[in-house]
Image (spheres, coloured by chain):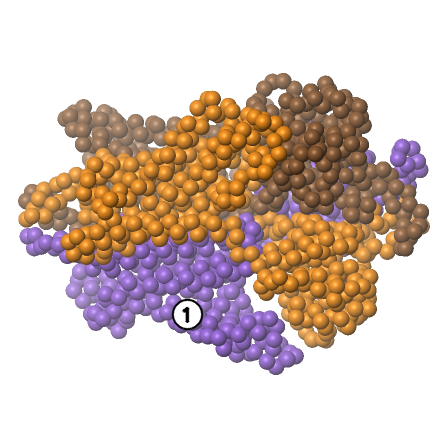
Chain colours: A brown, B orange, C purple
Amino acid sequence: MAANGKMSTGNEMVVLKTSEGDGPQYVKDSPRDHPIVIIGAGDYGRSFAGRLVKTGIRVVIGSRDPERRRPNVPEDVVVTSHSDAISRGKIVVLAVPRDAYSDMAELRSDLTGKIVVDVSNKERLDTEKSNAEYLSEDILDKSLVVKGFNVVSAWSLESGLAGGSKEVPICSDDKEARGEVIQLAKDMGFFPMDYGCLRAARDVEAIPLRLLPGWRFATKLMFGLLAFMSIYVLFQGPLYKYVKSGVTKDIQHFPGKGFNRVLAMLALTLLALVYFPGIIAAFRQLAYGTKYQRFPIWLDTWLKSRKQLGLLALLVASLHAIFSACLMSPEYYYHMYEKGPVIEGRQFYGMMFWRGELLIFTGGLALALMSVLGVTSTPSVQNAMNWREFVFVQSKLGFACLFVGTAHCIVYGSTGFNKMYLYVWYTPPPALLVMLLPCLLILLKLFLLSPCLNSRLMQIRRGWESKPKATPV
Amino acid sequence: MAANGKMSTGNEMVVLKTSEGDGPQYVKDSPRDHPIVIIGAGDYGRSFAGRLVKTGIRVVIGSRDPERRRPNVPEDVVVTSHSDAISRGKIVVLAVPRDAYSDMAELRSDLTGKIVVDVSNKERLDTEKSNAEYLSEDILDKSLVVKGFNVVSAWSLESGLAGGSKEVPICSDDKEARGEVIQLAKDMGFFPMDYGCLRAARDVEAIPLRLLPGWRFATKLMFGLLAFMSIYVLFQGPLYKYVKSGVTKDIQHFPGKGFNRVLAMLALTLLALVYFPGIIAAFRQLAYGTKYQRFPIWLDTWLKSRKQLGLLALLVASLHAIFSACLMSPEYYYHMYEKGPVIEGRQFYGMMFWRGELLIFTGGLALALMSVLGVTSTPSVQNAMNWREFVFVQSKLGFACLFVGTAHCIVYGSTGFNKMYLYVWYTPPPALLVMLLPCLLILLKLFLLSPCLNSRLMQIRRGWESKPKATPV
Amino acid sequence: MAANGKMSTGNEMVVLKTSEGDGPQYVKDSPRDHPIVIIGAGDYGRSFAGRLVKTGIRVVIGSRDPERRRPNVPEDVVVTSHSDAISRGKIVVLAVPRDAYSDMAELRSDLTGKIVVDVSNKERLDTEKSNAEYLSEDILDKSLVVKGFNVVSAWSLESGLAGGSKEVPICSDDKEARGEVIQLAKDMGFFPMDYGCLRAARDVEAIPLRLLPGWRFATKLMFGLLAFMSIYVLFQGPLYKYVKSGVTKDIQHFPGKGFNRVLAMLALTLLALVYFPGIIAAFRQLAYGTKYQRFPIWLDTWLKSRKQLGLLALLVASLHAIFSACLMSPEYYYHMYEKGPVIEGRQFYGMMFWRGELLIFTGGLALALMSVLGVTSTPSVQNAMNWREFVFVQSKLGFACLFVGTAHCIVYGSTGFNKMYLYVWYTPPPALLVMLLPCLLILLKLFLLSPCLNSRLMQIRRGWESKPKATPV
């Protein structure tokens, strides 16, 4: 009992002992004085049992077929029948598939008054009530049903704490039962989150069905831009030439040279889109004279996708670097190389001239800065930085990166901006088109950094309002 | 006492106070009411003391030479003689080297009834009993010996929580003593693991002597393949030419061109080996009609090494990308470039033709996908994903990567598959040899995705069995 | 009350219940039986409230303007007037800006005897007393002021545990109040650090104002070396030629070819500087015959900056790889390519000869090894390794990397070391200059690995001293 007592939070159980341990003892019958009962000896049940045993908690497994030998059942764990297992404890973890819940009706009386933990997941999102509500209302209406642990996979039960402890939402209509399971989760090394009443199980059961929602906006934007830019580059160059003079050569060079141009445009645009919403938000705050005016949903989504946009920009920029390094030769980028002799009608080239070397210099520098931004946005590095450091890296270094990247683009395109034959079909050449957004952004940022606007913005962000107590819409 | 009380789990110590604090107090003499005693003022002892003090726990250090000034002893820590220190507390951390354990015999009576924590490590694995058992049986047989904290280095005691809290195995034959030390570890910010009786100290002491066991299979496989492929590429090309016509040129090009070919083959093969065992496991489950049949050890090891194989594939593929970018020129890969004029008997080339650009396109895409797989397999990123997201990235994106990588290989080799002079010494050219495994894998995967097999597999993985209750071998 | 009891550590509150719950109850009036009071409904206050609610703790917010609707106030949180809110709880979190502290004087009597948590930050470091001391001494002298949570931003309150739990320093002159807040921090998923008395608030308030102090030494060193090497390469090559013969061509090639040389020199030197201080420390320990002699500050700083130096070396080496891949052609590195025909006075080249391929081989290998070193120095990967694995990777693999990197440098420079015309202005060519340090280092390391010195060093590092009990300076 002493070892269990260690796991207990204490105040629900009082042990009065003299130092010799022979004095009077008033013991409240706490759920954690008993072993944890796990119904179901499948993968999940066994993994759950393993984690509990490692935590120092006793476990009884209830199985339909207790005699059967199973691999991976931890030592010291008793495997017995459902009813016997349930009779030994107060907290019962229901590790059976959702389909088998109706079979649990036969355990209804055994489970009366017990805390029943529903760890199940749905196979897809639907509008029906949650598994936990179904269990609580239709099957085990005399038990204290608690939803929890459904976000924890069997794999992560086994693999321990790598990567930091995991958030585990827990909810129940019974506060005391919820508190017991919260403490259990804490003892198992998880970080329980109190989600309140069992109605919240609908949200909790939706969590494991999520598929990278934070990445949706950024990836859609990226693929949209990729499609647009591919078409633009294809039409503005190779297809124009084909239409005008029937030359197919440039179309054949699209997977390498053309796509590399698309990658360059995409990387710079994605990087600009990381810093654009912050500028919009600043101007909005200046216009409304308050920071308490809520942002429209599109701006809010955009602001929350900045990290993802930045990481995609880094991925695309790295690809652009590899493509460029593979293609870098006078045959591909002749306007970056010094002209050498003409031999039998063929122009040969020498080294790059200064513009070409500057191109590599600025490109390399931008990629290096972007890599630093990428590394500092991983959770564990970010966690080691304070707010000031985070802002310094993400804002100062980030704008430096945007600046160098834009310079890279200008160095590349500047030989062509004055060549009118590149403005075909009334469209500007890609390098000109793509530098407009970052240049605009840099100008707006400089404008915001002007002392007058900057001090007002700082004021607003500290809570000052131009029209106090305005009720937000 | 109040501050210590905060750290206590509560039920072993009962304090009855009125709200004024002047009422009657029944206090059980709990070990944590006393300071923690550390025997040994060396690096480890001082680091341990520092961490305890930061946690808000009082510390007394016992030293053979208490007068000596030492750097890094935290303020508020009393340094005194061994006996005096031990008399002040109930939990004694023995921070002396294993060699000095025999000297501890003189403290045997002082340590009677105390909880003694053995934090020592072995220098090498041997078959003798553990340090903790030796201490408990031969030196301090009247103390409650607990093994613990040996996996925590002085450095990680000082550097705090960066990277998440660490798992600390703890074991002892005395349940109450074990519980006390488990709680102490918890308070210090570690995640204690209950390993049961002191016999388990043999396993616990083996942990710090481990040298990357999870990487052994994958690195051995990689170096084996590297050796085989190097020899194959060397023999099939340069050495064949030397034997047939005495040309040494190709041997001189082995460190760059030849080795780059080896890197390409190795990367694709390693990636295929990531997905191979999953396919085998699926067919095995279909054949046996159950998922409860245990996998043979070789398959289990292979399945557990998939992450390592994938990371090695990424490393090798990145190297291949850099090598390729450095060598990419008509002199090296003439069959990827358009022919230009022949001047004075020398063939000149122009841009790449479409196959060459496709080569770069597919290679870049495969590397980008593999980088995403690599990033998502770091512990902290993985911890932030749910199971569905993890499966999506590692399985869907992973197979996409294998598919694009195989396409990259086919684009490269396809110009040569029909050239019979490449099939020297009855062996296929390397590019053909290396694409066999991933192609087979893709076919098997498509076969498994056929509705009939796929639904049966899903059924089996949910626990269905074709011959229920079969006793596994 | 029961749900709150779960959060309590127990011994400050005693509940005696029979198992029916109708027995006598002696309840000490613990601060955590009451809701946590937050004064201030700004961003920080609301984020703090949100985290508390998720943790399962009741919250009351006190606001000057309780009627006003605010976004993001969690459900179940009562917003009321300052006085009313304070009257409901015992722990009061002061979430108002530092400027508004003087206004808090009017709450002085309300806050008498309450635990007041000061979460504020300074805008800049000054020599005045800390905000917490000001609050405790000048404004709320009848309250128990505790400094805490100032290192936690509103953003990290909202974003949860990603990247592991955060260290939160807490200090107060009242031990019991400090203990309460330590427990609160623990319950919220943070890792509280006991900093002792309120005087320590000066250190605690300095933490969020830190700007990457661990990176200062390494970045300064890097930029210093960058400047020196840039000037050296510029003078030794392009400027010398300009002065001697008026040729400006090499100056134009500085951003690409020249800077790439600087990057190569910088990467190798930074890598050597990672392993240099360890060698110095070893010789120092051998000379003094003890490990207890403290290192001088410069050596200590250098030793602590090794990780940062290594990561910068990796960044610079990656840049060097990309630059090299972009420039790799006979026009840039003619001495690495086989001579082809001379056509109309222009020399053409073929493939690389073996030295060139070896250059790529060694460079690629060094970069791969350095990448492994970089990945293993991220907090979460490092946390998963034991001490032996860490030493193996960082020391063995690290020296292998230095060795291969030095070989890369020798392969590059060896064609020129004997060409006296490269020794202009009495200075050696850059490739010769830069290989001196790593070569010296490798020799010293080999010297240290000689059996006699190595065994003595191992002895010293286990605590042996040649002159025992020497008092360190």
Position of residue C103 in the picture relative to residue B152 (left or right)? right
Residue C460, percent from left and from top: 57, 74
Q: Which residue is mark 1?
A: C441
Circle 1: residue type: Leu
Q: Is residue A43 left or right of residue A93?
A: left
Describe residue A423's horizontal placement relative to residue A461 as left or right: left
Q: Is residue B118 above or below residue C460?
A: above
Residue at (58% x, 76% y) in the render: C290
Q: Quadrant of the C terminus of chain C?
A: bottom right
- Can you give x and y, in whole percent of width and height, for residue C140 in the image? 76, 48
Q: Can residue A435 be seen?
A: no
Q: Residue at x 44, y 26 (%)?
A: B449
Report which quarter residue B66 is drawn in: bottom right
Displayed quadrant of residue C87: top right
The front one of B109 and C144 is B109
Q: Position of residue B154 (x, y in %)?
A: 62, 61
User: To which chain does the residue with label 1 belong?
Assistant: C
Q: Which residue is found at the position 23% from the left and 57% from the top?
A: B252
Which residue is at the front of the view, A68 or C107? A68
Q: Secondary structure at mark 1?
A: helix
Q: Does residue A250 show up?
A: yes
Where is residue B374? Give x, y as percent: 45, 43
In this rendering, the count of numbered labels is 1
Residue at left 39%, top 51%? B224
Asked if residue A108 is positioned above or below residue B125 in the image, the reply reads: above
Q: Is residue C88 left or right of residue B403?
A: right
Within 10 Å of the Cα at label 1, are there few (<14), some (14-19), or many (20+) other Cα atoms? many
Task: Say above or below: A100 vs C213.
Answer: above
The N terminus of chain C lies in which quarter of the figure? top right
